[in-house]
Image: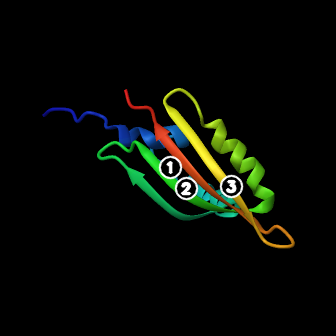
Amino acid sequence: MEEQKERGSSKVWARVFESDAPTDEELTRSLATAAEGYRVRRWWKYGQPAIDRIKATLDVPFDNAGPLVQDLLGANGKGLQVSLDAFPYGIPDLEGVMINVLFEREIQ
């Protein structure tokens, strides 16, 4: 019987978690951290079967906006371009920031 080749999608978990597939505890911890930091309002993916571009709108509490923007822009590098724009809201006291972010994979 022929061995199945490892697909790119099966490698995703290894980049995020210590093992190939997340444990229930790791997945719960990651989702809880994301839920505290921001809320995804909408997102789109482009490209089949490989995703070449992702556009998303994030709603971020004002205190979390700076660190999140730094993390997003820190993902820039060879093979990935990240660009964003941010719009604070809440008058007279700032409540949060809507961040439109675009991840584009370098196509060779």
Which class describes the residues within 10 Å of circle 2: few (<14), some (14-19), or many (20+)? few
User: What amino acid does circle 2 point to?
Assistant: Leu
Residue in front for this viewpoint, 50 or 85: 85
Residue denoted by label 2: 27
The quadrant in which the N terminus is found is top left
User: What amino acid does circle 1 point to?
Assistant: Pro
Q: Percent position (x, y) of residue 83?
A: 59, 43
Q: Nearer the viewer, mark 2 or mark 3?
A: 3
Query: What's the distance in space between the residues labelled 1 and 3, CA to CA?
Result: 32 Å
Residue denoted by label 3: 86
Q: Earlier in the sequence, mark 1 or mark 3?
A: 1
Horizontally, residue 105 falls left or right of residue 35, namely left
Horizontally, residue 66 falls left or right of residue 71, namely right
Query: What's the distance in space between the residues labelled 2 and 3, CA to CA?
Result: 28 Å
Horizontally, residue 102 falls left or right of residue 46, namely right
**Quarter of the figure with residue 11:** top left
Residue in front for this viewpoint, 85 or 108: 85
Q: Earlier in the sequence, mark 2 or mark 3?
A: 2
Residue denoted by label 1: 22
Residue 66 in sight in this render:
yes
Residue at 64% x, 51% y is 85
Q: Mark 2 near mark 1, Cβ–Cβ under 8 Å?
A: yes
User: What amino acid does circle 3 point to?
Assistant: Ala
Q: Percent position (x, y) of residue 72?
A: 64, 44
Horizontally, residue 21 falls left or right of residue 70, namely left
Q: Going by the picture, which residue comes out furthest to the bottom?
A: 91
SS assignment at label 2: helix
Q: Earlier in the sequence, mark 2 or mark 1?
A: 1
